[in-house]
Structure formats: structure tokens, C-alpha cells
Amino acid sequence: MQCHELLLPDWAWERADELPETENAGALRRVQAALTACGQAQALGNLLVLGSGAGRLSWDIHRHLAPSTTLALDNNPLLSAVAHRLVALQQPWQLLEVQPSRQLGLPQEQLWWLEAPAADTELRSRWFALAADAWQAPLRRGCFDVLVTPWFVDVNGREIRELIGLVAQLLKPGGLWINTGPLLYASNLTLAQKYTHDEILTLLGMAGFSVEFQQAETLTYLKSPLSTQVRGEQVWTFAARAPAQGYINTQAEFPPAWLQLPHLPIPHSVALVQQQNPVLQQLLGLVDGRTSLQQIAAQMAPNLDPGQDALALVKTVFAQLLLGVEMEA
């Protein structure tokens, strides 16, 4: 039942929508505007949509802009199954909406047909739905030319710095990241982790991304044709170009970029810090100018007690090293 508000707008409501622009058309327009501004509207290559929901935006991009392949990934298996059935199998089905706040003169119940815009078999053969956790997805590093995160910031449960690292790992060097949606945040994040637009732009710059497009607009969201209520959101869309291969942030700042964004490589100079403690000296021995805090944490994790956060531990150790704090093994 919780998926109704995601299934119906994607595949049913627009046929009864009297707005000048449907929600689906608006979402596609924002992505197209970003691609056009970045000179990539005609050459998408391999496309990944993270948090694809019921799949409509991924399918609209695929059938209008024809990337080489499109992977629509969402952690909800029901939404992914619906997308696969409607798009890949071209099998429509019906879903009942029960609307408690119905408009005067309209029914309280409506049986909707869910159906994907048709396309030929060859085009559909290059679109795929995948039910998976974005943070542990079975995907190779650096295999996507374009990555889209629609309405992902508010539901992914992680903070922006981790999302930037994930995107950087999945994109090819020089690939394009398009984010579109409101800056809502999961309730588990602290106020300090709920970054503003300007802070996100700063973090992108630290990670080597160059922002080539951004715009904000206020629109209606999840508007049922039967309902008396409508939700409004300010949607921020940006397109950021991933750094070139081997990018290292050399700017002098404290704390350094590699400590704030743990997917970035740790400069080799950090390994020159002298430590009497043999365990810490061994940890510094892993620093080679290419390895990140994330990678060191992954090596340490199997040796820690269950429940210990390897990345948090490694970040603390290196932060204390930079501050010159004496540490015990």
C-alpha cells in the first residue's frame, strides 16, 4: 500500500492529469535540460538511475534519448518488479486507488490501468531493472557514462559526502552526475549532516567534480486526479562532471579533502609521519598515494569486533595523526 503513491503517478495518473505539464514530463524535461547544457544530450552511453522507483523516468530517458544501456536500480523489489513487468515485458495491469480526501463529484475509488509507453523490442532489450541496495550494488567501478539520482537524497539514508563517493566510484572518469529532487534528508541524520546547497557545491569541488548546470523550481508532486490535496516541493537539479582518472586534491585545507571525503586517495606525504607505535606505523604503510580511507577501512574490517565501524575508526586515527595526538594501540 505504501507504494501506491509511487506506482500511480509513474504509470497511471498522467492520463487524467489536467496540468499543463505532467509530473513525468517535467522530470524528463529537467534531465534533458541538464544534458543539453552539458553537451551530452545525444551521447549518453551507459546510464544508471539510482533510486529509480517504479522506473518511469529511467524509461522515458531511455526511449527519448536512447542511451547504449539503461540500468534502473531501486532497493524496493516490488517497484523493480513492476518496472520490469511494464517495460521489459510490456504487460499492463490494474491497481485500485482509494482516495479518502476526494474532490467533490469524483469517486472515492478508481481502478487504474498501469501501462508503459510502448517501444520496439530492440530498444527494450537495452533497458534493465535491478532490485539492489545502492550502497552494495553488484556493479563494477567506473562503468557508467551518466548517473541520475532522482529524489534520492531524501530516501537513501546516508549523507551527501558518502553519496558523492558512491557516484565517483560508479562513474567513468569525466562521467556526468545529474541529481534532481528536493533537499530533504533522512531523519537519522544529524542537523550537521543536512547540508545546504552551497555546502554541497563546496563538497563537489573538493571531490574534483565540476558543476556545469543547476536550476531550482517549485512544483506540485504526487497529485492524484481524485484528491483535494497536493504536495509542493522545490526541486534542485544539478549536473556535475566527474574528475579525470587519478584525481588528487592538492589544495591546502584543514581538515584535508581526503579526510572529509574518504573515497579520495590519501597523499603519499601522510605516510612520512613518524609513529613509534608499530600498529599505527603498519597502518601508515598502507598509504601509497592511491589508497583511500575507505579502502583501508575495508582491509581492517574483518579484524574488528562485530558492530565496530571500521571507517569511523580509521578516520579517527588519521585525524589524530594530523593533530599530532599521541595514541595507544
Image (cartoon, rainbow, N blue to C red):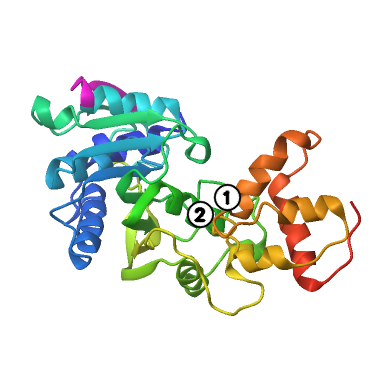
Q: Is residue 72 left or right of residue 206?
A: left
Q: Is residue 269 left or right of residue 3?
A: right
Q: Which mark is residue 165?
A: 2
Q: Is residue 242 left or right of residue 164?
A: left
Asked whether 211 or 140 is in front, the reply is: 140
Q: Is residue 93 visible?
A: yes
Please state the horizontal and vertical placement of residue 288, each as a whole percent of the image: 60, 57
The stretch in magenta equals: 88-96
Q: Residue at x 74, y 61 (%)?
A: 318
- Above-or-below relation of 315 to 64: below
The number of numbered badges drawn on the structure is 2
**Circle 2/circle 1 CB separation < 8 Å:** no
168 drawn magenta: no
Q: Residues within 10 Å of mark 2 (few under 14, many from 20)?
A: some
Under circle 1, the secondary element is: loop
Q: Residues within 10 Å of mark 1 (few under 14, many from 20)?
A: some
Asked whether 260 or 318 is in front, the reply is: 318
The image quarter in which residue 66 lies = top left
The residue carrying mark 1 is 158
Quadrant location of the N terminus in the rendered image: top left
Please state the horizontal and vertical placement of residue 254, each as a whole percent of the image: 66, 76
Under circle 2, the secondary element is: helix
Please state the horizontal and vertical placement of residue 188, each as a whole percent of the image: 65, 50
The image quarter in which residue 326 lies = bottom right
Which amino acid, by three-letter code, is at mark 2?
Gly
- Above-or-below relation of 267 to 123: below
- The furthest residue to the left: 120
Q: Residue at x 75, y 70 (%)?
A: 322
